[in-house]
Image (spheres, rainbow, N blue to C red):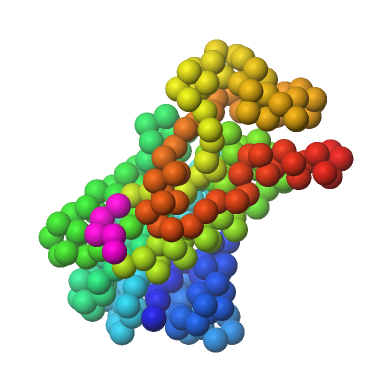
Protein backbone atom coordinates (compact mmCIF):
# COMPACT_ATOMS: atom_id res chain seq x y z
CA UNK A 1 0.00 0.00 0.00
CA UNK A 2 1.24 3.50 -0.88
CA UNK A 3 0.52 6.00 1.93
CA UNK A 4 0.89 9.77 1.94
CA UNK A 5 1.63 11.07 5.45
CA UNK A 6 1.68 14.80 6.17
CA UNK A 7 3.43 16.27 9.19
CA UNK A 8 6.38 13.86 8.97
CA UNK A 9 8.63 16.16 11.01
CA UNK A 10 6.22 15.96 13.95
CA UNK A 11 6.27 13.62 16.93
CA UNK A 12 3.45 11.52 15.51
CA UNK A 13 4.14 11.72 11.78
CA UNK A 14 7.75 10.60 12.02
CA UNK A 15 6.84 7.56 14.12
CA UNK A 16 3.91 6.62 11.89
CA UNK A 17 6.16 6.73 8.81
CA UNK A 18 8.77 4.50 10.47
CA UNK A 19 6.08 2.03 11.53
CA UNK A 20 4.50 1.96 8.05
CA UNK A 21 7.88 1.27 6.44
CA UNK A 22 8.55 -1.51 8.94
CA UNK A 23 5.22 -3.08 7.92
CA UNK A 24 6.23 -3.07 4.25
CA UNK A 25 4.24 -0.07 3.02
CA UNK A 26 5.50 2.54 0.58
CA UNK A 27 5.48 6.03 2.06
CA UNK A 28 5.50 9.58 0.76
CA UNK A 29 5.98 12.14 3.52
CA UNK A 30 5.31 15.88 3.47
CA UNK A 31 5.90 18.74 5.89
CA UNK A 32 6.66 22.46 6.01
CA UNK A 33 10.29 21.58 6.69
CA UNK A 34 12.30 19.09 4.63
CA UNK A 35 12.55 15.72 6.36
CA UNK A 36 15.02 12.92 5.71
CA UNK A 37 13.65 9.45 6.48
CA UNK A 38 15.44 6.42 5.00
CA UNK A 39 13.32 4.55 2.43
CA UNK A 40 10.61 7.25 2.38
CA UNK A 41 10.03 9.90 -0.26
CA UNK A 42 10.01 13.21 1.65
CA UNK A 43 8.78 16.51 0.24
CA UNK A 44 8.94 19.99 1.79
CA UNK A 45 5.73 21.84 1.01
CA UNK A 46 3.31 24.52 2.13
CA UNK A 47 0.01 22.89 3.04
CA UNK A 48 -1.89 26.10 2.34
CA UNK A 49 -0.82 25.97 -1.33
CA UNK A 50 -3.64 24.29 -3.22
CA UNK A 51 -1.81 23.08 -6.33
CA UNK A 52 1.07 21.64 -4.33
CA UNK A 53 -1.32 19.69 -2.14
CA UNK A 54 -3.12 18.30 -5.18
CA UNK A 55 0.14 16.96 -6.58
CA UNK A 56 1.05 15.29 -3.27
CA UNK A 57 -1.81 12.81 -3.60
CA UNK A 58 -0.85 11.46 -7.02
CA UNK A 59 -0.59 7.67 -7.06
CA UNK A 60 -1.27 6.97 -3.38
CA UNK A 61 -3.84 4.62 -1.87
CA UNK A 62 -4.41 6.42 1.44
CA UNK A 63 -3.85 9.97 2.67
CA UNK A 64 -3.04 10.32 6.38
CA UNK A 65 -3.24 14.05 7.01
CA UNK A 66 -1.52 14.43 10.38
CA UNK A 67 0.17 17.80 9.86
CA UNK A 68 -1.26 20.74 11.82
CA UNK A 69 -0.52 23.41 14.39
CA UNK A 70 -1.48 22.36 17.92
CA UNK A 71 -2.09 23.71 21.39
CA UNK A 72 1.65 24.24 21.89
CA UNK A 73 1.49 26.82 19.10
CA UNK A 74 -1.18 28.99 20.72
CA UNK A 75 -0.25 32.60 21.39
CA UNK A 76 1.05 33.20 24.91
CA UNK A 77 3.55 35.78 26.18
CA UNK A 78 6.09 33.08 27.01
CA UNK A 79 5.68 31.01 23.84
CA UNK A 80 8.44 31.54 21.24
CA UNK A 81 6.70 29.06 18.90
CA UNK A 82 3.38 30.93 18.91
CA UNK A 83 1.36 31.10 15.70
CA UNK A 84 -1.29 33.64 14.77
CA UNK A 85 -4.94 32.87 14.10
CA UNK A 86 -4.15 33.29 10.38
CA UNK A 87 -1.34 30.72 10.71
CA UNK A 88 -3.79 28.27 12.30
CA UNK A 89 -6.32 28.89 9.55
CA UNK A 90 -3.78 28.36 6.76
CA UNK A 91 -2.29 25.19 8.22
CA UNK A 92 -5.30 23.52 9.83
CA UNK A 93 -8.33 24.64 7.83
CA UNK A 94 -6.97 25.51 4.38
CA UNK A 95 -4.45 22.67 4.62
CA UNK A 96 -7.15 20.12 5.49
CA UNK A 97 -9.41 21.36 2.68
CA UNK A 98 -6.53 21.15 0.20
CA UNK A 99 -5.65 17.60 1.20
CA UNK A 100 -9.29 16.50 1.00
CA UNK A 101 -9.42 18.00 -2.49
CA UNK A 102 -6.21 16.12 -3.29
CA UNK A 103 -8.03 12.90 -2.42
CA UNK A 104 -10.88 13.88 -4.75
CA UNK A 105 -8.68 14.96 -7.67
CA UNK A 106 -6.47 11.85 -7.43
CA UNK A 107 -9.26 9.34 -6.72
CA UNK A 108 -7.73 8.39 -3.37
CA UNK A 109 -10.47 6.32 -1.71
CA UNK A 110 -9.46 6.68 1.96
CA UNK A 111 -8.49 9.63 4.14
CA UNK A 112 -7.24 9.59 7.75
CA UNK A 113 -7.39 12.89 9.59
CA UNK A 114 -5.84 14.04 12.87
CA UNK A 115 -8.66 15.51 14.91
CA UNK A 116 -8.36 16.20 18.64
CA UNK A 117 -10.19 16.08 21.95
CA UNK A 118 -10.34 19.90 21.71
CA UNK A 119 -13.50 19.45 19.62
CA UNK A 120 -15.34 18.73 22.86
CA UNK A 121 -17.04 21.75 24.42
CA UNK A 122 -15.23 21.69 27.77
CA UNK A 123 -11.96 22.43 25.93
CA UNK A 124 -13.18 25.33 23.77
CA UNK A 125 -12.35 28.21 26.10
CA UNK A 126 -8.86 26.85 26.75
CA UNK A 127 -7.82 26.08 23.18
CA UNK A 128 -9.53 28.88 21.25
CA UNK A 129 -8.53 28.99 17.59
CA UNK A 130 -7.04 25.49 17.73
CA UNK A 131 -10.39 24.12 18.92
CA UNK A 132 -12.18 26.01 16.16
CA UNK A 133 -9.93 24.57 13.42
CA UNK A 134 -10.59 21.01 14.55
CA UNK A 135 -14.34 21.54 14.77
CA UNK A 136 -14.35 23.01 11.26
CA UNK A 137 -12.14 20.15 10.08
CA UNK A 138 -14.60 17.51 11.26
CA UNK A 139 -17.39 19.32 9.41
CA UNK A 140 -15.29 19.36 6.24
CA UNK A 141 -14.65 15.62 6.59
CA UNK A 142 -18.38 14.96 6.82
CA UNK A 143 -19.01 17.13 3.77
CA UNK A 144 -16.38 15.38 1.64
CA UNK A 145 -17.73 11.98 2.66
CA UNK A 146 -21.26 13.00 1.60
CA UNK A 147 -20.25 14.89 -1.54
CA UNK A 148 -17.42 12.72 -2.85
CA UNK A 149 -17.86 9.29 -1.24
CA UNK A 150 -14.37 9.25 0.32
CA UNK A 151 -13.96 6.90 3.29
CA UNK A 152 -12.81 9.08 6.18
CA UNK A 153 -11.61 8.28 9.69
CA UNK A 154 -11.03 11.14 12.11
CA UNK A 155 -8.93 10.38 15.19
CA UNK A 156 -9.62 12.57 18.23
CA UNK A 157 -6.22 12.41 19.84
CA UNK A 158 -5.67 13.23 23.48
CA UNK A 159 -2.42 14.85 24.56
CA UNK A 160 0.69 12.87 23.65
CA UNK A 161 3.59 15.34 23.34
CA UNK A 162 6.76 14.23 25.17
CA UNK A 163 6.55 15.61 28.72
CA UNK A 164 7.71 14.17 32.04
CA UNK A 165 6.44 10.72 32.98
CA UNK A 166 4.51 11.72 36.10
CA UNK A 167 2.63 14.60 34.46
CA UNK A 168 1.89 12.44 31.42
CA UNK A 169 0.69 9.53 33.54
CA UNK A 170 -1.71 11.40 35.79
CA UNK A 171 -2.87 13.26 32.69
CA UNK A 172 -4.34 9.95 31.54
CA UNK A 173 -7.20 10.65 33.95
CA UNK A 174 -8.16 13.58 31.74
CA UNK A 175 -7.29 12.99 28.07
CA UNK A 176 -3.60 12.07 27.81
CA UNK A 177 -2.31 8.90 26.16
CA UNK A 178 1.11 7.35 25.62
CA UNK A 179 2.65 8.26 22.21
CA UNK A 180 3.20 4.64 21.15
CA UNK A 181 -0.53 3.98 21.63
CA UNK A 182 -1.35 6.95 19.39
CA UNK A 183 0.89 5.48 16.70
CA UNK A 184 -0.83 2.11 17.10
CA UNK A 185 -4.28 3.67 16.68
CA UNK A 186 -3.16 5.63 13.63
CA UNK A 187 -1.71 2.54 11.95
CA UNK A 188 -4.94 0.65 12.61
CA UNK A 189 -6.93 3.46 10.97
CA UNK A 190 -4.62 3.62 7.95
CA UNK A 191 -4.87 -0.12 7.39
CA UNK A 192 -8.65 -0.32 7.91
CA UNK A 193 -10.66 -0.37 4.67
CA UNK A 194 -14.13 -1.27 5.98
CA UNK A 195 -15.13 2.00 7.69
CA UNK A 196 -16.99 4.60 5.65
CA UNK A 197 -17.07 7.58 8.03
CA UNK A 198 -16.22 7.61 11.72
CA UNK A 199 -14.62 9.77 14.40
CA UNK A 200 -12.84 7.90 17.16
CA UNK A 201 -11.62 8.90 20.62
CA UNK A 202 -7.92 8.12 21.03
CA UNK A 203 -7.34 8.53 24.75
CA UNK A 204 -6.47 6.28 27.66
CA UNK A 205 -9.43 4.00 28.52
CA UNK A 206 -10.79 4.46 32.05
CA UNK A 207 -13.18 2.19 34.00
CA UNK A 208 -15.24 4.92 35.64
CA UNK A 209 -19.03 5.05 35.83
CA UNK A 210 -20.95 8.33 35.61
CA UNK A 211 -21.26 8.26 39.40
CA UNK A 212 -17.48 7.84 39.70
CA UNK A 213 -16.90 10.87 37.47
CA UNK A 214 -19.32 12.98 39.51
CA UNK A 215 -17.78 11.76 42.76
CA UNK A 216 -14.28 12.57 41.55
CA UNK A 217 -15.32 16.06 40.47
CA UNK A 218 -16.95 16.57 43.87
CA UNK A 219 -13.50 16.19 45.43
CA UNK A 220 -13.46 12.50 46.35
CA UNK A 221 -10.50 11.73 44.14
CA UNK A 222 -8.69 9.16 46.23
CA UNK A 223 -11.94 7.36 47.04
CA UNK A 224 -12.69 6.90 43.35
CA UNK A 225 -9.16 5.90 42.33
CA UNK A 226 -8.55 3.43 45.16
CA UNK A 227 -11.84 1.74 44.26
CA UNK A 228 -10.11 0.53 41.07
CA UNK A 229 -6.46 0.49 42.12
CA UNK A 230 -6.48 -0.35 45.87
CA UNK A 231 -2.97 -1.80 45.63
CA UNK A 232 -1.66 1.69 44.90
CA UNK A 233 -3.53 3.57 47.66
CA UNK A 234 -0.33 4.88 49.30
CA UNK A 235 1.16 5.90 45.96
CA UNK A 236 -1.98 7.78 45.00
CA UNK A 237 -2.04 9.57 48.36
CA UNK A 238 1.58 10.60 47.85
CA UNK A 239 0.73 12.14 44.48
CA UNK A 240 -2.66 13.59 45.40
CA UNK A 241 -1.50 17.08 44.40
CA UNK A 242 -0.68 15.77 40.91
CA UNK A 243 -4.22 14.57 40.23
CA UNK A 244 -6.18 16.59 37.64
CA UNK A 245 -9.29 18.47 38.75
CA UNK A 246 -11.57 16.18 36.78
CA UNK A 247 -11.60 12.89 34.94
CA UNK A 248 -12.96 12.42 31.42
CA UNK A 249 -14.66 9.28 30.19
CA UNK A 250 -14.39 8.65 26.46
CA UNK A 251 -15.59 5.90 24.15
CA UNK A 252 -12.21 4.24 23.67
CA UNK A 253 -13.73 0.75 23.81
CA UNK A 254 -15.54 1.50 20.53
CA UNK A 255 -12.28 2.81 19.05
CA UNK A 256 -10.38 -0.36 19.90
CA UNK A 257 -13.14 -2.75 18.84
CA UNK A 258 -13.83 -1.12 15.47
CA UNK A 259 -10.21 -0.41 14.54
CA UNK A 260 -8.97 -3.74 15.89
CA UNK A 261 -6.20 -2.87 18.34
CA UNK A 262 -5.72 -2.72 22.11
CA UNK A 263 -4.30 0.04 24.30
CA UNK A 264 -1.89 -1.60 26.73
CA UNK A 265 -0.29 1.42 28.41
CA UNK A 266 -3.23 2.53 30.53
CA UNK A 267 -3.50 4.22 33.94
CA UNK A 268 -3.03 0.93 35.78
CA UNK A 269 0.16 0.33 33.80
CA UNK A 270 1.34 3.82 34.72
CA UNK A 271 0.78 3.24 38.45
CA UNK A 272 2.60 -0.11 38.27
CA UNK A 273 5.50 1.51 36.44
CA UNK A 274 5.63 4.46 38.84
CA UNK A 275 5.70 2.06 41.78
CA UNK A 276 8.43 -0.06 40.18
CA UNK A 277 10.55 3.04 39.63
CA UNK A 278 10.31 3.85 43.33
CA UNK A 279 9.10 7.37 42.63
Q: Which quadrant would residue 141 be assigned to in this image?
A: bottom left
- Does 235 sit left or right of 35 as displayed? right
Where residue 193 sits: x, y (%)? Answer: 31, 67
- The residue shown at (68%, 44%) is 269
Q: Measuring from the top left, give residue 259's x and y in whole percent.
A: 40, 57
Magenta residues: mostly which secondary structure? Answer: loop
Query: Is residue 234 placed above or below 271 in the rendered structure?
Result: above
Q: Is residue 219 visible?
A: yes
Residue 22 in the figure: left or right of residue 6: right
How many marks do you count on the picture? Answer: 0
**Which of 246/126 is in front?**
246
Name the image quarter holding the C terminus: top right
Q: Residue at x 46, y 54 (%)?
A: 69
Tell me the residue at 52%/53% (across/down).
262
From the image, which quarter does the N terminus lie in?
Answer: bottom left
Can you name the residue that lies furthest to the right here? 278
Q: Is residue 197 magenta?
A: yes
Q: Magenta stretch: residue 42 in it? A: no
Residue 256, position as x, y percentages in the image = 45, 51
Q: Quadrant of residue 246?
A: top right
In the picture shown, does residue 245 fall above or below 118?
A: above
Using residue 49 as the reference point, say whether residue 118 is left or right of it.
right
The answer to whether residue 52 of the structure is visible from this angle is: no
In the depicted structure, whether residue 267 falls above or below residue 100: above
Can you give x and y, in whole percent of width and height, for residue 138 in the image? 29, 49
Numbered range of the magenta stretch: 194-198
Residue at left offset 25%, top offset 63%: 151
Amino acid sequence: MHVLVTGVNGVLGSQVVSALLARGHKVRGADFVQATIPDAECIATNMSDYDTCISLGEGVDVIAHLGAYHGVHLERPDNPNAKTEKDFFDANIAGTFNMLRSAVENNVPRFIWASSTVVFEHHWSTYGIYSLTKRVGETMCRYFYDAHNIKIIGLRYGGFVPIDFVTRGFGMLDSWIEPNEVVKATLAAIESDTIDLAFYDVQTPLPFTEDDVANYRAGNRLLVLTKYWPQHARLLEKYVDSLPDMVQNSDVIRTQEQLGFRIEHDFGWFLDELSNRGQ
